[in-house]
Image: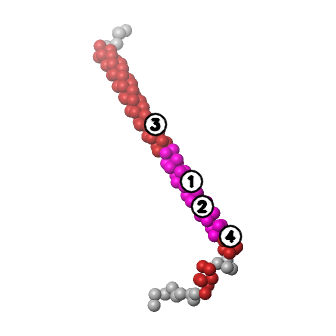
Amino acid sequence: MDSPPLATRVLSALNRALGHLLFRVKQALGLLAQSVQRDQLRELTDEARVLGSASAESINHVGAELREINERLAKLEREIERIGSRLEGNGAGDRILEKHEDEPARSLSTD
């Protein structure tokens, strides 16, 4: 009676085989999950790279547009200053200004 019965040995062997099989399945599923995660990380990295490039391009475009607007505003400011200085210097003797001052004000209504 020192040795266990045959049924106990068979069940023990089946238990070890099943444990080994489940370990291998778990290992395979882990490798599959790692592979899927790497693919997802690679996709996210690619998308981040594309978005970063698009963002940089957009910033460059907006910067160029803002520079153009700034140049136009500076030109308008210079023009306004020039007109203001002309009005201050020549306002009393300016025929165009005197003509407008002599004319009666027109009504804005559409009667």
Depicted 3 relative to depicted 48: above or below = above
- Residue 85: which disc? 4
- Determine the CA span between mark 2 and mark 1: 12 Å
Quarter of the image containing the C terminus? bottom left
Q: Estimate the x, y position of residue 110 in percent, counting from the top left.
A: 46, 87
Residue 73 vs residue 7, the one in the foreground: 73
Tell whether label 4 touches label 2 (CB within 8 Å).
no
The residue at which mark 2 appears reads as 75
Q: Mark 2 or mark 3, which is nearer the start of the sequence?
A: 3
The residue at which mark 1 appears reads as 67
Quarter of the image containing the N terminus? top left
Comparing marks 2 and 1, which lies closer to the viewer? 2
Q: Which residues are magenta?
A: 55-83
The residue at which mark 3 appears reads as 45
Three-letter amino acid code at disc 3? Thr
Comparing marks 1 and 4, which lies closer to the viewer? 4
**What secondary structure is found at the residue carrying circle 4?**
helix
Can see residue 18?
yes
